[in-house]
Amino acid sequence: MWIEILLLAELARGPRHGYELRREIEATTGHALSNNSLYPRLRRFVESAAVRRRAEEHAGTPPRHVYSITGVGRELLHDMLAALPQDTTDNGRQFTARVMNFDWLTTEEQLRILDAQERILDRKRAHVAGLSPSRAGSWSRRVLDYGVARLDADRAWVTVLRAEVEAARAADGVGRAEDDG
């Protein structure tokens, strides 16, 4: 779902053709995005009326398709950002795609996502830390310790994000203004 979130969020910034979408997502995430990942999703968005597609003619070349988000697409983007599916929330890409687009969410929705991520990281850390004693002295122990350290770093980052969200709420006196974005 992280690709869908990023596609709709990029289109919410303005109309783009497929290559521009791919390039922008790769530039902001560092993850390569293949045409096989991009175009089937765009086709599904067009079929569901979340995205509009129009042909842009260019002399001497085939027409390029330009995609733009619709009102339905904006609602879908918000719903995808705010949703907390238990089976995917712990996916790092899912979480970072949501954080990258926190501007679309209210403060309460942002905090709910951070709460869920904290619970997931705490559960994973307890699991991985519980494995370590059985691997004392081995290379496996080093890998498990590294995993715990990474989870601790992720948890610390979520704590920083929470402080930033709460500071913004205190400065604004409310969550994101409903007429923004």
Image (cartoon, grey):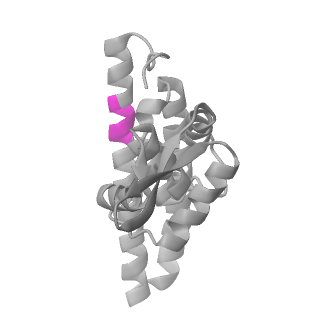
Name the residue: 49% across, 33% down. 110
Name the chief secondary structure element in magenta: helix
Q: Is residue 161 magenta?
A: yes
Left or right of residue 59, residue 73 in this image: right
* Viewer-side residue, 104 vs 90: 104
Residue at position x 34%, y 55% in the image: 24
- Residue lying farthest to the right in this orientation: 48
Q: Is residue 16 left or right of residue 167?
A: right
> Residue 49 in the image: x percent, y percent?
66, 42
Q: Is residue 30 above or below residue 50?
A: below
As rendered, which of 78 and 134 lies closer to the eye?
A: 78
Residue 130 shows in the view: no
Q: Is residue 43 left or right of residue 94?
A: right
Query: Residue 20, image x and y in percent?
Result: 36, 57
Q: Quadrant of the N terminus?
A: bottom right
Q: Position of residue 6 (x, y in %)?
A: 46, 50
The one nearer the camera, 27 or 124, is 27
Quarter in which the C terminus is drawn:
top left
- State the extent of the magenta-drawn residues as a range: 159-164
Identity of the residue furthest to the bottom in this view: 138
